[in-house]
Amino acid sequence: MTEASVVETGDGVSEAGETFPLPYTLAVDAMGGDNAPDIVLAGLEIAAIRHPESRMLLVGDEAVLKEGLKRFPKAASICTIRHTPDSIPMDMKPTAALRVRHSSMRLCMEAVASGEACGVVSAGNSGAMLALAKIIVKVLPGISRPAMTAVQPSARGDVVMLDLGANIACDARNLVEFAIMGEAFAQAALSLESPTIGLLNVGAEELKGDERLRQAAEKLRDSVLSDRFVGFVEGHDITGGRTDVVVTDGFTGNVALKTGEGALKLAFGLLKNVFQTNFVTKLGYLLVKPGLERMREWIDPRRYNGAVFVGLNGVVVKSHGGADAEGFASAVDVAVDAVANDLNAKIRHRLEQLGMLQPAVGTKGSE
Amino acid sequence: MTEASVVETGDGVSEAGETFPLPYTLAVDAMGGDNAPDIVLAGLEIAAIRHPESRMLLVGDEAVLKEGLKRFPKAASICTIRHTPDSIPMDMKPTAALRVRHSSMRLCMEAVASGEACGVVSAGNSGAMLALAKIIVKVLPGISRPAMTAVQPSARGDVVMLDLGANIACDARNLVEFAIMGEAFAQAALSLESPTIGLLNVGAEELKGDERLRQAAEKLRDSVLSDRFVGFVEGHDITGGRTDVVVTDGFTGNVALKTGEGALKLAFGLLKNVFQTNFVTKLGYLLVKPGLERMREWIDPRRYNGAVFVGLNGVVVKSHGGADAEGFASAVDVAVDAVANDLNAKIRHRLEQLGMLQPAVGTKGSE
């Protein structure tokens, strides 16, 4: 295989137009995901074209990866292999996963912790990934719990939503932290100067929801984020794009994410039936095909693949376990964006402004 | 106005093909909703054509309603007016709403409690409606909390979802009760013999979610509902139609409902843009227009308007506050179906089988 030819100097320019030092390395868990390592390597082949300045520390079974990379020369040109025979099965419990000493996922996290890599991308077991990230990459000072964050399509452009499942139950402080991290994420990933923030609830009125939500809203109204915080938003406001950031607990966020995806899938399924009805409708399809494909591409879950566990001392990106090569490449895009736009520096800056750099007593690391 | 000419004998046939005694009366809150009473009267005009055997006890300001009914002769032919000058504003808190002694909504509930009407339909204030229903119509023995229930579109036909917002926080027993009521609702509203039931969670694996969900799942697996209960389902399973009934707490259900609706709206918005691009795409639109209109109609939120507060000693149906006449007529359809198919008898039967006819200690009526 071709080893990475390390670029010693020079600056890169991110999509957002910001500059960042080269080279930067991402640790990639080659053994995570339903179709690893094939999909990972095929995804890196796409990523190598999009981000030729990047370097990948590819962690997994060396023999398998060497053989596999022969089919992906562009990926090979940016990859260095780190061998380990161990990996974490998709259905292993986090507590068990922590005991796998030399798993590919763990070695990726260690590369971030040691500074060898700026971030990690894995399509592996989410629970294991969060547990390892907390222990090895470590939680940012001032943050009690990392949150799973991703970008979703809306009628008004992309929307940042968090938490998408890292924390099943959340208190008011967690939600405030999510708002801070969501704002930083929207600045980094969507290049928005002043992203607006909404707190997901069952109604927009101040009295709606539970005590926890009302407390979080009150804290946000009284904070330096007050001019960004628009109050409570509802389910339809996510795809309506009412705010740039939608904050919620991990249970609700996960359900909302999947329900929205499911509804879009339903719409496309019905649409397919409409076009396939007869000769006339098939002709109709041909007339609108280009626009329809752009539409499908625009709301394609693959394009939105790549959730970031925000609130950690490094960029940790989770690709969907069933993602294809295009999807995995999107997850790499997300990692590159977060590194290039220094997501964590933005979070730290806000925590400092909010006087939250010290964790609340009793909430640090609690789950 | 034309007073109802009461049919003394004879049987009706519901859409589900079951027979039920005539006449049956629904109490209709003429003053509830964003555009009351006009939309209510226009909705009843449609309902009168669909359900000529029904009788409506129309509660509200007599002078206004008499004048209004002049424009809706079919509605007038099935309506009897009960005068009251009071109504509950859409934004009034439930505690305040309970103190309005002669509100149109309260008189409707009283008509159900006295047996004068089998059910009530209102597009008014949801919180007030639930509070009044609990106090006046009363909760079924064995049920600790009524749940808001409605039918949603899916790829495999209609799906019953509950709770949609009546109970922000729920325990395991509440969720089990929702499953019982959801099953009965699916039998009554969808005419399904053996509806399948899923518990909404962040993953299908047994260990996912919180203790409350795992307990509810365990109880359902050990009950007479075990052959109907398929386990945990995820957000995308709602529109995927994996089960006929989806059970969740009122917070999650409300967010999921609105998120799904929002996503479908987004899809239609994008589709509109695709068709409006240029002359060619407009021609394409004309070729698929009939199918597209059927599709739009099929997933039209108006068609799914009408949520039932299940678990009460009567049929209590909430129409969306902003529903139009067609939407309000759908809510009347829902009430007619629930009455005709004796939804509550089905719930009582299951509660008896499950040995749950007595409420659990400490949970009766708790919120």
Image (cartoon, coloured by chain):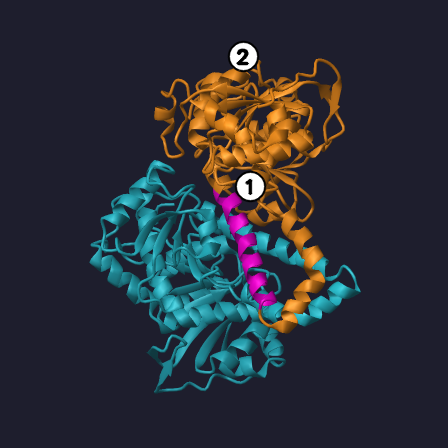
Chain colours: A cyan, B orange
Identify the residue at image location x=41%, y=71%.
A337
Identify the residue at image location x=59%, y=31%.
B179
Label 1, on which residue?
Answer: B200
Q: Answer yes or no: are tags 2 and 1 on the same subunit.
A: yes
Q: CA distance from mark 2 to mark 1?
A: 37 Å
**Crowd tier of the residue under label 2, counting other residues whose Cα lies within 10 Å: few below 14, some 14–19, many 20 or above:** few
**Crowd tier of the residue under label 1, counting other residues whose Cα lies within 10 Å: few below 14, some 14–19, many 20 or above:** many
Identify the residue at image location x=60%, y=72%.
B278
- Give percent across and percent down for residue A264: 58, 56
For mark 2, give the secondary structure.
Answer: loop
- Give percent across and percent down for residue B257: 53, 44
Residue in front for this viewpoint, A281 or A201: A281
Residue B257 among those drawn in magenta: yes
- Give percent across and percent down for residue B155: 67, 49
**Kind of residue at badge 2:** Ser
For mark 1, give the secondary structure.
Answer: strand
**Is residue A128 found left or right of B239 in the rendered image?**
left
Q: Quadrant of the N terminus of chain A?
A: bottom right
Residue in front for this viewpoint, A55 or B127: B127
- Numbered range of the magenta stretch: B255-276
Residue B297 among those drawn in magenta: no
Picture quadrant of residue B289: bottom right
